[in-house]
Image: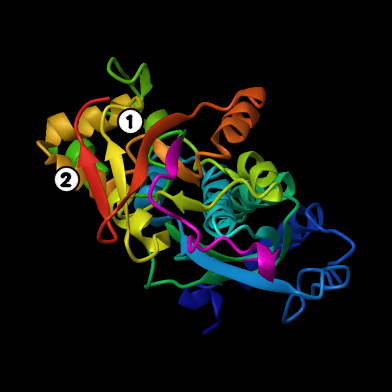
Amino acid sequence: MRYRDAGVDIDAASQAKARIKQLARSTFSPRVLREVGAFGGFFSMQGLPRDAVLVSSVDGVGTKLKLAFALHRHNTVGADLVNHCVNDIAVHGAAPLFFLDYLATGKLHPKVVTEVVRGLAAACRKVGCALVGGETAEMPGFYPEDEYDLAGCIVGWVKRSRIIDGRGIRPGDVILGLPSLGLHTNGYSLARKVLLEQEGLPLTEPIPELGRTLGDELLAPHRCYWPTVQPLLKRGWLKGLVHITGGGITDNTPRILPAGARAEVRLGSWPVLPIYDLIAQRGNVPPDDMLRTFNMGLGMLLIVSPRDLPKVTSNLKKRREKFWNIGRIIPGRRGVKYLQGK
C-alpha cells in the first residue's frame, strides 16, 4: 500500500508546487527574503516607519466556488480572495504587504491549482502585495475529487496615527457609496438556492434581465477598492470606510460607528443591479433579508466630513469613479436607519 493508493498523489503535488513557485515569484519585492517552499514566508520590515502597525485579515471565497466548479472556470476566484482581503484591511487605512493562501481539495489537479494561483498572483501584483507562501492540501474522502476550498490571509501596515477606526465620525458626516461588480463573494448560498435549485435557471444561457449569462453574472469579480481609496486616505479625507460583505449595509456599517452615531441610508439613491431584483422577485425574498445578505450594488462606503466632501468628490470624478451620495450620519443608537426614496 502506497500513499497514492490512499488517494494522495505526491508527484502531482510537486508538479503543482513548481508552477506555484513561478507565479508567486512574479509578486516578489526586495522585502521577500526566501523563495516559496520554506516552512515559513520571510518578509523584511525594513523601511517601514517606526510607528507602523501591522493589520491582518483572513477570509475565504465561500460557495461562489460552486459556480467555478460547475463552469470549470478557476482563474477568477483567486483574485476574488485577494481583493476581498485587501478591502478588509483598506478600511483601516492599511496598505497590503504580503499574502498567504490555503487550498484544500479531494484530488489535486495541477492545472486547476495553477489557474487558481494565477488569479491570486495577478491580484497581488496589482496592489504591490507579495504572495509569500501557502498550503495546498490533498484530502481524499474529505472533499469531493473535483472540488476545493480556498482561503487566504493578508498582512498590511498603517501608521498608528493614520489608523481609520471610525472614532472621528460625527452626525452630519456624509456617506458615499462606490459600486460593486456584482455579488462579490457574499450571498451565494441564497442566490444558488433561488436561481439554480428553485428556478432551475441555466448558467450558460443569456438571461434577458441581466444582459448576459447567469454564469458570467455570478462569477463577476470581487472588486478591489484600494487604488480608489488610497489617494483619499493619503490626504486624510476619509473618516471611515465600510467594506460591504456578508451582512450587507445593515450589519457592516455599525462596525465602524462610534457610540451615539447612526447611519441614515436613502434607499433608491443608487442603482440596484439587476441580479438583485432577479433574486428578490424569483425567490420572494423580503427586502430586509436582501439588505442583510447582499451588497445591493455597493461594495464600499466612504464616510466624509462635509468640509472634505468637495475634495473627495472632485478626486473621484477625476478618476472617473462612479459614486453616489446615499446618506448621512445622524445622532442615535449605533446602527442603520433606512429611508425610502431618493
Is residue 75 found inside the magenta-colored segment of the image?
no
Neighbour tally class for label 1: few under 14, some 14-19, many 20 plus, Cα within 10 Å: some
Q: Is residue 21 left or right of residue 176?
A: right
Q: Nearer the viewer, mark 2 or mark 1?
A: 2
Neighbour tally class for label 2: few under 14, some 14-19, many 20 plus, Cα within 10 Å: few
**Of the pair 312 and 99, the residue shown nearer to us:** 312
SS of the residue at dot 2?
A: helix
Residue 215 quadrant: top left
SS of the residue at dot 1?
A: loop
Is residue 117 placed above or below 54 in the rendered structure?
A: above
Q: Residue at x 75, y 51 (%)?
A: 128
**Of the pair 284 and 115, the residue shown nearer to us:** 284
Q: Residue at x 25, y 42 (%)?
A: 191
Q: Amino acid at mark 1?
A: Leu
What segment is highlighted magenta in the picture?
155-177
Residue 263 screen position, x and y as percent: 32, 49
- Sequence-wise first label, 2 or 1: 1
Q: How is the image coloured?
A: rainbow
Q: Residue at x 51, y 44 (%)?
A: 305
Q: Which residue is labeled 1 in the image? A: 203
Is residue 17 placed above or below 268 in the rendered structure?
A: below
Is residue 140 placed above or below 243 in the rendered structure?
A: below
Q: Is residue 12 left or right of residue 104?
A: right
Residue 46 screen position, x and y as percent: 88, 72
Whether residue 41 is visible here, answered yes or no, is yes
Q: Which residue is labeled 2 in the image? A: 288
Whether residue 135 is visible here, answered yes or no, is no
Q: Is residue 12 left or right of residue 243?
A: right
Is residue 159 found inside the magenta-colored segment of the image?
yes
Residue 222 screen position, x and y as percent: 49, 43
